[in-house]
Image (cartoon, helix red, strand yellow):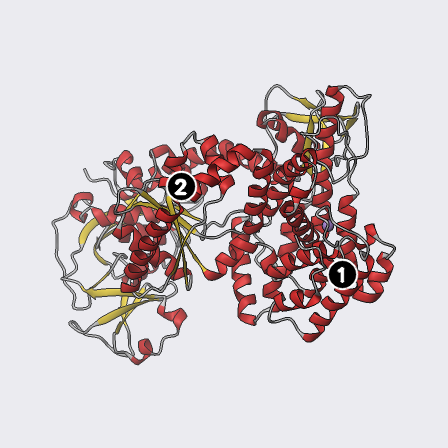
Amino acid sequence: MKQEAIGIEQLLASLPKYYTDEDRETVKRAYELAALAHANQKRASGEPYINHCVAVAGILSDLFMSADAVSAGLLHDVVEDSHISLQEIREKFGSSTASLVDGVTKLKALPRVSRNDQDDDFFEEDDSDDETNLTMEQLSKRKKMLSHETLRKTMVAMNKDVRVIIIKLADRLHNMRTLSYTRPEKQRRIARETIEIYAPIANRIGIGEMKWELEDLSLYYLEPEKYKEIAAGLNERRAVRTQQMEKIKKRLEETLLDSGIKADVSGRPKHIYSIYKKMKSKERSFDQIMDVRGVRLLVEDKAACYATLGIIHSQWRPIPNEFDDYIAAPKENMYQSLHTAVMYEDNKPLEVQIRTHEMHQHAERGIAAHWRYKEGTRQRDQQYEEFLSALRNQLDIKNEDMNADEFVETMKNDVFDEHVYVFTPKGDIIDLPKGSTPIDFAYHVHTDVGHRCRGAKINGKLEPLNYVLKTGDRVVILTTKQGGPSRDWLNPSIGLVKTQRARAKIRVWLKKQARDHNLTQGRQMLEREFHRLGLDEVNLENLSHQLEYRNPDDMFVALGCGDLSLSRIVTLISDQKTPDDVIETSAPKSETSSSDAVAVRGLRGLLTQMAKCCNPTAGDPIVGYITRGRGATIHREDCPNILRASTNEKERLVRVSWGDASKTYPVPIRITAFDRQGLMGDISNLLNNEGVNITDVNVRVNHDSLKADIANIRLIVEVRDISQLSRVLNRIENLSNVLEAQRSRAG
Ligand code: MN
């Protein structure tokens, strides 16, 4: 270990290239102040204390943190260990650096805990106090509370400025790297705290690099035998593995290049702790775990990720259930990647991770990468925005107008918000987001307790359900025997529920209740429509399967709540049944052909009209343009209006082709209406617009009624299919005075 101080030159040389001269000057001044403050102090290793400060600053600079954060890294121990005050730092380095130093200093002022059993203590580097009077039980209870307190304080600090935590993590990382110089009991204590608190925090904010190193170092001190065994095993296989990986890399690179994809392929490093965990949890042997090779492919953009996946899956057999799309659905900590596993040529599994270079930055540096983007180019900001918007979707935050800053705020509140710690009647501690109510508590305890929650006693006193819980409250939930949550609970202005977890459970319950109602509604709608169209023989079981519902009930529910439309069902039936099957004709069939009959792909029965601008005639290449409310207009493909169409308009183009002669079928329909002048004219106009011929009319007006005359109109109309019939009946029913329009029952 070096005994002399690391100079400033070394640190300056390692700073990010985009740092300005001013940034470098700031870091230099911070170094000078830290060197002065720690002038006579030494580390346990015997080297000058400033080396620790430089190392911490170096870790932060490797994460591309800004100059004020790197300066705060240099100064992080100054306030505690020297005569230099926070005020002085603020004057010399500004409030941002000062508040970071303050945050890190405050994190150290954690409560002390007994050191009676050294192995399990997980608090700060202090070994002075002595609480021999406490019983073991009191002690363990106290420790549990205090570990919560550590987390709570950490969360509070994180909420103010995540960078405080990143500095704290850098501090801890360097302390772990140099832990061999401390006493063995202390090593274990710090290692345990690291693996229980700091590694999970590094993971939560997505700094993968740090998480792995903290875990591996912790394991080294907590399970030295296991660690050495795994490390030796890795070492032994290193040469063979490297050779094997080189071959796989080359093969992958070539395969992808054949398809025009440039990918950086690298072997995925095996972390000792992850092997240890796998051996423990999956009860697999070291050799079994070693058989699994992992590669990481970095490609240009998202499209290339999916293209690469496709190529790999077509080349080697994918292993079922091993595919995860963390690009479409990023992990909580913003991690994005495609994961899959295939059977490689040698019949051993190969795990593959595919992501873009940007996603990789996030995987390694997490939130820390954000500051780099802030200082980088505009393009980077753009990508960050996209990233945030993906995350926004993931977190189900509906407010689209939220900008990136607001979003980060929201996320911080959601994830890092201050917590309250309350007690169950039995004395267990429950940790809830600040602002939680008795209902949140009830749902946390048990879903059923939540549903039946009607009141709450806080510290023995009856309180309203919108009471905001405070740390230390003892909560007793009063329940009814039956019943469930009310829709009001979800109303944010009443403030009865704070946590997403409780909200989700309430929604599930309400949805279930609504199901019965929607089912009845949906069934009635469908029965009525089928009756109107004279479709009695529809097999509901088959129909529901075709629409991808498990059974008719599910289909009715979807219909009742609006997830499924009647017209979709009608179109489906119309598309697969030839009209002859479903339209029984009472009159003899007629076949009419018209020169302008066109078939629109996927939209049978859509009203079409020929465009006046280009007048297509049979045989011309044509394209359909969906108009608002008038079906589709048919243009020649080379019509100038089509060629000039904007991107938006292009989306409304549909593929059409000249149909064979369009067949029509005569169907008798019956219309009941309060008679009025012009009614018959309106009906025939409507049919004319739809291109439907009327072949027979019979109107009978019933004068018996006291209030109004009832007209019974019977028509025979020539329709192309069920869809058209359904639409025509609907439109007729929407005419004023019409009571009902339906297909006459044959026979
Ligand atoms: Mn330190």
Left/right placement of residue 675 relative to residue 506 reads: left
Q: Identity of the amino acid at label 2?
A: Leu
Residue 684 visible in the current orientation: no
Query: Residue at image x 63%, y 66%?
Result: 15
Which type of secondary structure does the marked residue at label 1 adopt? helix
Question: Measured along the vertical axis of the image, is residue 209 above or below residue 192?
Answer: below
Left or right side of 357 for 110: right
First in sequence: mark 1 or mark 2? 1
Who's the residue at 63% across and 27% down the image?
445
Which of 461 and 98 lies nearest the eye of the viewer? 98
Question: Which numbered dot is residue 559?
Answer: 2
Q: Nearer the viewer, residue 527 or 76?
A: 76
Identify the element where label 2 is drawn: helix
Q: CA distance from mark 1 to mark 2?
A: 59 Å
Please tell me whether mark 1 or mark 2 is closer to you in this view: 1
When asked about the image quadrant of residue 246, the answer is bottom left
Q: Position of residue 631 (x, y in %)?
A: 32, 63
